[in-house]
Amino acid sequence: MRDTWLRTFRGPPSLRTLVVEYETLTWKKQQMEPIIARNKQFKLPIYSEPSATGMLEAEGDNQPIGYLSAENTKLEEWKWKGPSKLDGKTWNHHGEGETMEYVVVVDRWEFTEVQMQRGAALHVDDTDEDEEAWDSDF
């Protein structure tokens, strides 16, 4: 999962909670955990109104009115079983049998009202090490 959507996120003034569900095969959960930890470090700006171009960005008086943060939110987790074949096709990494188990981790970004500087959607670690391993599996 690339973090581009986090870096370019610009929320409308009505957005107060953003729920994100991460999903993978149960046996791959350990690969997903560092991605979730990295994403929780972002603060996503919320703007007072769209700019003249319709984009949510700092322009004139349109400055961030706050941000969404997942830093102190608790993760929720649940599992489900789904088909191991997709369109009738068998995949070796799905194992044998008709079903396989998935894990879903749910996180929430909550609104905090505060003045932010333009371009404030940053996180602490700017490396892409985890992205390479994650993206290569799909």
Image (cartoon, rainbow, N blue to C red):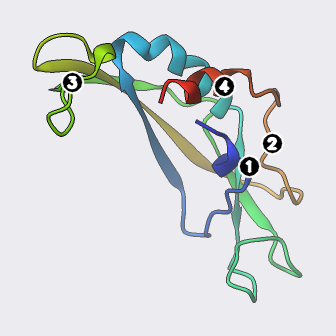
| Nearer the camera: disc 1 or disc 3 | 3
Identify the disc placed on residue 7.
1
Query: Disc 1 and disc 2: Cα gap in Å?
Result: 7 Å
36 sits left or right of 105 in the view: right
C-alpha span from label 4 to label 1: 18 Å
Separation of disc 4 and disc 2 at Cα? 20 Å
Disc sitting over residue 57 in the figure: none
Quarter of the image for residue 2 reads top right
The nearer-to-camera label among 4 and 2 is 4
Circle 1 sits in a helix, a strand or a loop, which is it? helix
Instruction: Find residue 90 and name its label.
Output: 3
**Could you give the CA–CA distance between mark 2 and mark 3, rounded to whole angstroms?**
41 Å
| Label 1 packing within 10 angstroms: few (<14), some (14-19), many (20+) | some
- Is tag 4's residue or tag 3's residue first in the polypeptide sequence? 3
Q: Position of residue 136 (x, y in %)?
A: 56, 26
| Nearer to the camera, 5 or 107 | 5
Question: Could you tell me residue 3's position as x and y percent?
Answer: 67, 41
Residue 127: x, y in percent?
Answer: 80, 26
Q: In terms of secondary structure, where does tag 3 sit?
A: loop
Pointer 2 with pointer 3, Cβ within 8 A: no
